[in-house]
Amino acid sequence: MRVLTKSRRVGALIVGLSWCLGAPGLTVAQTLQQGSAPQGSAPPEPLSWHGDPKAPDISGVWVRVDTPAGSGSKEGWAPWAPPLKGAFAQTWKKRVADAAAGTRTDDPVRGCQPPGMPRFITGSNGPMLIMQTPGRVMLYRDGMPVRRVWLTPDALPAAKDIESFSNGNAIGKYEGADLVTQIVGIKDQPIDGTGVPHSDDLKIAERFHRVDATTLTVKVTLTDATAYSRPMTSTVTYRLSDDRNWEPHEFLCTPVTNYSPDKYVH
């Protein structure tokens, strides 16, 4: 029986490791010095969410930082009070009174449901990931359905002809350095923490504008001739997060009874 001496065992180990690493002529010491990377290989490229070289870059992980000024709304809506019509005005007044009395139960956030649009943009804290690919822009947040904006020249169908979702149905296009979107088919949920309602005719327009390397503004306009006497707008500001590797996480939620919408927005 052949027995390997200590020196032979070490030599066999080196040969075996070199073969396993796919570099027959490379010693273990050379491999370790190179950080297990083949000679001549380029360093890894920085992580990027900008996968559409033809599009202006609004990608990245963004965190809302401002409290919009000049409005009584914590989510920046103007005009304020909201220009609601008839029964929609009565619905909102009741929700405000119920919230003051601690008896309001119709806010989806309170029941662990996604806040939907436009609160995805105007009424939520925490990171927001924007990913750009040819033909589509996707937006992610913890605990919320992903938003998909389809980049298409086709017009949106009428709201009555499409299914409603909390984030609606969105199309978009690039105008210069901006992403401009249109959204219809938004589920019947309040547009803010105070409970401002809308009708099935609600249309949402967004304009994403990258002011500089670390600043993004989003202007949101609501048009609803059935519920509002005139459009409502809010412009919010986001800063690029220091955590470039952030990704959406699993989200666990317990419905609350002492609900305060203020903790969801600045």
Image (cartoon, rainbow, N blue to C red):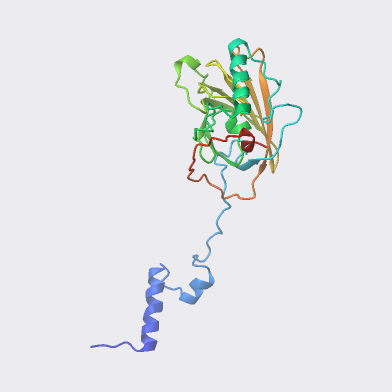
Question: In x, y percent, where is residue 136?
Answer: 52, 33
Quadrant assignment for the C terminus? top right
Identify the image quadrant of residue 178.
top right
Camera-side residue of 55 and 248: 248
Camera-side residue of 251 and 53: 251
Say if 251 sits above or below 23 in the image: above
Say if 129 sits above or below 180 in the image: below
Question: In x, y percent, where is residue 258?
Answer: 57, 36
Q: Residue at x 64, y 46 (%)?
A: 241
Residue extending farthest to the right is 70
- How many labels were placed on the picture? 0
Q: Residue at x 54, y 41 (%)?
A: 51
Identify the image quadrant of residue 171.
top right
Quadrant assignment for the N terminus? bottom left
Question: In x, y percent, where is residue 253?
Answer: 49, 40
- In the rendered image, is residue 165 in sight? yes
Say if 70 sits above or below 242 in the image: above
